[in-house]
Amino acid sequence: MIKYLCFLFLVLLTACTGVIETLPIADADRYKIQEIAAVKHGGPMDLSADGHMVAWSDTGLNLFMVETHQRRRLLDTTPDAICWSPDGKMLVAVVPQDGDSHLYVFSQAGQSVYDEKIPGRVSRLQWLEHGSLTAGILDHTTYKFGTHIVAHLLQWDALWRTTQIPLYETTIKPVTAVQLAGHLHETLDFDISSFGDEVLYTRLYAPPAFAATRHLVLRHLQTAVESKIADLPLIDGAGRLTSDGESALISNGVDAVRLEEMWNSERLTIWAGDSFSYAPPSGLIVVGNQLYQGGRSVLRLPPSSHAQISFGGDFLLVKWHSQLYLLSGYLVSHDNGPKIVDMEKLLKLRRLRSRGLIEPDEYHQSRERLLQ
């Protein structure tokens, strides 16, 4: 009881003084833990793959340079989404603006590089390791009989030229639109495969005679063939493709995250937690307050903490008790398994599979022959 009262006193003292507490984890001296800043309000956060740059939002967008401890205020509006480029040289942020969105691109030093107004609300940003920047965008128009939704992906190349990829259109009932007021864009989530040929996205399904829900859908971007993977709640829950493109990590938004083989719905692993952060190159995943690799627990964070893992998996950005920390030094295996010998043949196999022109057994046998 005395220990509990002392701990409570320290928490209250910290809240009053603004001093950052030490992140309480077992064997803390084994890791490198850097205190970044106090965070007053929740919002998106991200860190560069090399762990040198941290970006987070509370009442605006902040940039922290880890080596120099310099901090810059980039925006005074809270972004809907932020994302570092894989090389850590650019930071992208999207803020809401009069029902639409405005995209801002900053250099490592926080200088403005590019900006553009985008019709519709952006739900997520993704920058592939050797590909383009992609935004998931949901636009809507309200009528007396319902709200019409248009969802699409917008991609930018190195010269900031855009390509639009339609996802779906639907009309939802007025009662559903009211239920999702202010959060309608959050129903759209997506993840593009590491090969760039498929997208896993969430599709709002709200026909007049049925309860509204979301479907997690896999689409082959060239053939446009789709397969339903799972059902999700209206807003919570998400799906991410594993680095080999064969399985998906799926959160039900409540109490479980599962690893599922998409083509036979076999559940491979289930973790307890309502959300996750995944680093495809390493296979590391944070579920709840634990870091896992290959089903093995690597690190346990304090309860009620939230962690974002860097692209390569070597760093964790941890939010705990309204404080932000950068953590590294845990053991990570970067053995990504077998390599693809002929990428063009693999992509062809994946196209054939999406159209149902090849049996699963034949696909897996042919895929194995392309591995080394």
Image (tube, helix red, strand yellow):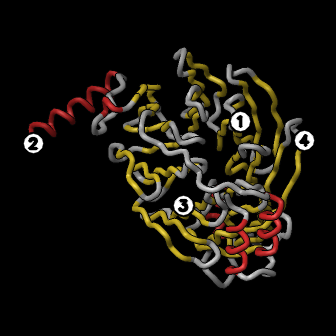
Check disc 4 and report the residue beneath it.
161
Query: Residue 60 vs residue 89: left or right?
Result: left
In percent of width and height, residue 343 lies at 79, 58
Choose the circle earlier in sequence order: 1 or 4. Answer: 1
Classify 195 as above or below 255.
above
The CA span between labels 3 and 4 is: 32 Å
Which amino acid type corresponds to the residue marked 1 in the rendered image? Val
The CA span between labels 1 and 4 is: 15 Å
Q: Which class describes the residues within 10 Å of circle 2: few (<14), some (14-19), or many (20+)?
A: few
Report the disc number at residue 1. 2
The CA span between labels 1 and 3 is: 24 Å
The mark tally for this picture is: 4
Check disc 1 and report the residue beneath it.
92
Choose the circle earlier in sequence order: 3 or 4. Answer: 4
Choose the circle earlier in sequence order: 1 or 3. Answer: 1
In percent of width and height, residue 298 lies at 39, 47
Labels 3, 4: front one: 4
- Residue 12 placement: quadrant: top left
Classify 363 as above or below 40.
below
Choose the circle earlier in sequence order: 2 or 1. Answer: 2
Choose the circle earlier in sequence order: 2 or 4. Answer: 2
Check disc 3 and report the residue beneath it.
236
Choose the circle earlier in sequence order: 3 or 2. Answer: 2
The CA span between labels 2 and 1 is: 47 Å
Image quadrant holding the C terminus, namely bottom right
Which amino acid type corresponds to the residue marked 4 in the rendered image? Arg
Image quadrant holding the N terminus, namely top left
